[in-house]
Image (cartoon, rainbow, N blue to C red):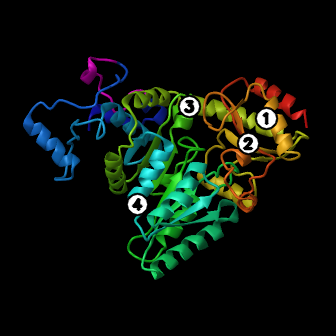
């Protein structure tokens, strides 16, 4: 193995935050530059016609790679040094065999789902989920002959197990199969936890040779505070726009998993052309170096605010990962190492009171993203989940008095002062 991909120092296993500084990159290949240059190029020059032939044989699956053979550089839709180094480093955090990066979180989700599903098959997902994900599932996939259904994240682990078994049995009875079980945990925006290990056990218990793939959107907590692949998931997905990018200045997505399933997704990415540009990949490499510092600081700020908000007379409840019930606490204890820094509150009143608080905020910015260095606030019922029916909002506990907060790295006392003056209006 190249010394630039070593994960140990003697008998010591190196930590991800250490590996982010140079893993997968050889300065000797780039004039000794300590940082990865931006390979802003569309195509790459072959040293010989024979090299071009060998590279394409591997890229198009005409032969297996030789041991230690790397895929030669061909064209930036297929491979690019910035993307390859970024993917190597992303795989470290989740201990994945392979990682792929995409032009957005939705590009990662849609490319992966399209690679795993065929007409006549089924998808089961936990709700609520990110709005774009639900739009893909509920409106796009049915047009392609894929049947989609959901199970409420707050229905509990046993309901999830039963939903997976039922969907699989019904699909087989109709001559199809359940292709994907898709879980977003914690749920957006209620922070309801879904038991990943229980879902993994349920998909492995499905009858038939081709069991469903368990896909987990880990954007809210990962990659520091939750590791779905270690809990039995087949794929873990991210909006890298959020914590990994973390500066609200880029759009990107990621997918990680085992070699075989990732090969299918890599093929779909190459043909759909959903990879990011080299500059975005370079910016993500920059951000990975401080990922742990930013996430740790944001979480510490969030923990302080949560403890105070729970005592505030204008707040009916605080929705945080693992805090809803004994079952939720048990799931959190089994699969998480931190609560993250995105949570929701229910203010006393309804939409009018929620809007009054939001409009009074001065440091928290009104925006619908999360995981940046700055603190954000949003009103899911009227924005990201506005297309939910009243019945669906009630089922998923997305009320009009719900405000979602993404806590950044500012001074926590300043953030508390901002929330206090806004909440004083109700």
Discs 2, 1 touching: Cβ within 8 Å: yes
Q: CA distance from mark 4 to mark 3?
A: 29 Å
Q: Earlier in the sequence, mark 2 or mark 4?
A: 4
SS type, badge 4? helix
Q: Nearer the viewer, mark 4 or mark 3?
A: 4
Query: Residue 154 placed where, x, y %?
Result: 70, 61
Rendered-image quadrant of the C terminus: top right
Q: Residue at x 61, y 55 (%)?
A: 334
Dominant secondary structure, magenta: loop
Q: Which residue is mark 2?
A: 379
Q: Determine crowd level at label 2: few under 14, some 14-19, many 20+ residues with C-alpha closer than 10 A.
A: many
Disc 2 element:
loop
Residue 300: image location, x then y, percent: 69, 33
Q: Residues within 10 Å of mark 3 (few under 14, many from 20)?
A: many
SS label for mark 3: loop
Examine the structure image and report whether residue 24 is included in the region drawn in magenta: yes
Task: Locate residue 302, reporting x and y percent.
Answer: 71, 36
Residue 197 visible at all: yes
Identify the magenta region: 21-33
Residue at 90% in and 32% down: 424
Q: Which residue is mark 1?
A: 358
| Placement of 181 over or under 259, stated as above or below | below
Q: Nearer the viewer, mark 4 or mark 1?
A: 1
Q: Residue 246: which numbered mark, if any?
A: 3
Q: Which residue is mark 4?
A: 116
**Residue that sits furthest to the bottom in the current view:** 173
Q: Would residue 333 be found to the left or right of residue 93 on screen?
A: right
State yes or no: discs 4 and 3 in contact (Cβ < 8 Å): no
Q: Position of residue 37 (x, y in %)?
A: 34, 22
């Amino acid at each position: 193995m190249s010394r630039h991909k070593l994960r140990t120092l003697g008998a010591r296993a190196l930590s991800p935050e250490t590996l982010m500084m140079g893993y997968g990159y050889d300065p000797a290949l780039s004039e000794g530059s300590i940082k990865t240059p931006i390979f802003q190029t569309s195509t790459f020059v072959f040293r010989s016609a024979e090299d071009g032939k060998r590279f394409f044989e591997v890229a198009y699956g005409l032969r297996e790679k030789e041991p230690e053979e790397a895929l030669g550089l061909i064209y930036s839709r297929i491979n690019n040094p910035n993307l390859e180094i970024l993917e190597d480093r992303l795989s470290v955090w989740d201990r994945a065999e392979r990682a792929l990066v995409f032009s957005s979180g939705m590009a990662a989700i849609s490319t992966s789902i399209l690679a795993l599903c065929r007409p006549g098959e089924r998808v089961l997902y936990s709700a609520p989920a990110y709005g774009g994900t639900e739009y893909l599932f509920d409106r796009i996939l049915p047009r392609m002959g894929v049947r989609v259904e959901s199970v409420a994240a707050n229905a509990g682990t046993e309901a999830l197990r039963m939903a997976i078994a039922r969907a699989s049995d019904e699909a087989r009875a109709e001559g199809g199969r359940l292709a994907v079980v898709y879980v977003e945990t914690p749920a957006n925006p209620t922070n309801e936890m879904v038991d990943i290990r229980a879902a993994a056990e349920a998909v492995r218990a499905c009858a038939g040779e081709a069991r469903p793939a368990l896909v987990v959107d880990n954007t809210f907590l990962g990659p520091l505070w939750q590791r779905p692949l270690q809990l039995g998931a087949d794929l873990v997905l991210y909006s890298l726009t959020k914590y990994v990018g973390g500066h609200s200045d880029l759009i990107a997505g990621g997918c990680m998993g085992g070699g075989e399933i990732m090969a299918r997704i890599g093929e779909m990415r190459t043909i759909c052309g959903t990879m990011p540009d080299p500059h975005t990949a370079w910016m993500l490499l920059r951000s990975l170096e401080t990922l742990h510092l930013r996430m740790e600081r944001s979480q510490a700020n969030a923990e302080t605010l949560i403890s105070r908000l729970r005592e505030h007379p204008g707040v009916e409840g605080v929705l945080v990962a693992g805090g809803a019930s004994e079952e939720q606490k048990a799931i959190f204890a089994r699969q998480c190492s931190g609560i993250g820094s995105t949570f929701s509150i229910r203010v006393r009143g309804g939409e009018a009171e929620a809007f009054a608080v939001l409009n009074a905020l001065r440091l928290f910015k009104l925006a619908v993203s999360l995981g940046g260095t700055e603190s954000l606030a949003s009103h899911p019922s009227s924005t990201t989940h506005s297309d939910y029916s009243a019945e669906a909002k009630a089922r998923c506990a997305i009320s009009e008095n719900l405000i979602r907060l993404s806590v950044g790295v500012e001074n926590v006392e300043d953030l508390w002062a901002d929330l206090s003056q806004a909440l004083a209006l109700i």
